[in-house]
Image: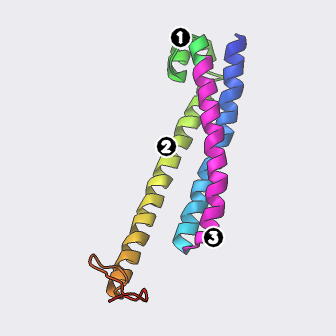
C-alpha cells in the first residue's frame, strides 16, 4: 500500500509538471505567431527543464509500477479497484493533459512549417537561396 501512496504522490507531481508543460506549449504558440526568435529561445530553455523533469518522473513511475507488478496505471486500477477514487482521477487528468500537449504541439509544428515555407519562398525570390549558387574570390555571389 505504501508503494501505491508513493505512486499517487508521483502521479500528482506528474500532473502538475505536465500542466506546466502545456502552459509552455501554449506560450510557444503565441511566440511562434509573433515570430520572436529570442523569446522562443528563452522559452525552449524552460521547456527543456520541464521535459527533463517529466522524464525523471516517468522513470520513477515505471519503477513503482514494476514493484506493483503492473505495466500501466490503467492496469493498476484494474488490479487494485480500490485505487479508482484516488489514482483514477489523476490518471484521467494526466491523459487529458498529454492529449492537449499533443494537439498544441501539432499546431506549433504546423506554424513552424509555415514559417519555414515563407522564409524559403522569400529567400528564393530575392536570390539568396539557389541550388547552384557560386561565390567569387571576394565572397560575392557570381
- Which residue position holds label 2? 99
Q: Position of residue 123 (x, y in %)?
A: 38, 81
User: Which residue is located at x 67 percent, y 16 percent?
Assistant: 4
Q: Position of residue 134 (x, y in %)?
A: 32, 82
Q: Position of residue 39 (x, y in %)?
A: 64, 68
Position above or below: 52 against 40: above
Residue 28 colored in magenta in the image: no
Question: Which residues, given as a range, are shown in magenta?
Answer: 35-64
User: Which residue is located at x 65 percent, y 55 percent?
Assistant: 45
Q: State the CA–CA distance, disc 1 to disc 2.
A: 25 Å
Give the overall secondary structure of the magenta segment.
helix
Tell which circle, 3 or 2, labels the residue nearer the N-terminal end: 3
Front position in the image: 116 or 89: 116
Q: Secondary structure at mark 2?
A: helix
Q: Secondary structure at mark 1?
A: helix
Q: State the CA–CA distance, disc 3 to disc 2.
A: 28 Å
Q: Secondary structure at mark 3?
A: helix
Position above or below: 78 against 114: above
Q: Position of residue 91 (x, y in %)?
A: 57, 29
- Which residue position holds label 1? 79
Q: Residues within 10 Å of mark 2 (few under 14, many from 20)?
A: few
Q: Quadrant of the C terminus?
A: bottom left
Q: State the CA–CA distance, disc 1 to disc 3.
A: 49 Å
Task: Farthest residue to the front: give it.
Answer: 137
Whether label 1 touches label 2, CB < 8 Å: no
Front position in the image: 79 or 142: 142
User: Which residue is located at x 55 percent, y 16 percent?
Assistant: 76
Tell which circle, 1 or 2, labels the residue nearer the N-terminal end: 1
Q: Which mark is residue 111?
A: none
Q: Which mark is residue 38?
A: 3
Depth check, mark 3 against mark 2: the one in front is 3
Amino acid at each position: 500500500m505504501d508503494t501505491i501512496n508513493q505512486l499517487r504522490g508521483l502521479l500528482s507531481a506528474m500532473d502538475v509538471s505536465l500542466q506546466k508543460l502545456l502552459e509552455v506549449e501554449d506560450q510557444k504558440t503565441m511566440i511562434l505567431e509573433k515570430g520572436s526568435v529570442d523569446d522562443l529561445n528563452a522559452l525552449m530553455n524552460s521547456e527543456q527543464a520541464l521535459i527533463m523533469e517529466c522524464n525523471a518522473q516517468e522513470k520513477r513511475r515505471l519503477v513503482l509500477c514494476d514493484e506493483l507488478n503492473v505495466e500501466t496505471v490503467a492496469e493498476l486500477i484494474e488490479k487494485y479497484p480500490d485505487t479508482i477514487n484516488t489514482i483514477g482521477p489523476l490518471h484521467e487528468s494526466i491523459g487529458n493533459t498529454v492529449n492537449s500537449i499533443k494537439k498544441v504541439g501539432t499546431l506549433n509544428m504546423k506554424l513552424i512549417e509555415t514559417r519555414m515555407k515563407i522564409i524559403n519562398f522569400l529567400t528564393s525570390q530575392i536570390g539568396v537561396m539557389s541550388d547552384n549558387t557560386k561565390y567569387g574570390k571576394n565572397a560575392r555571389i557570381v
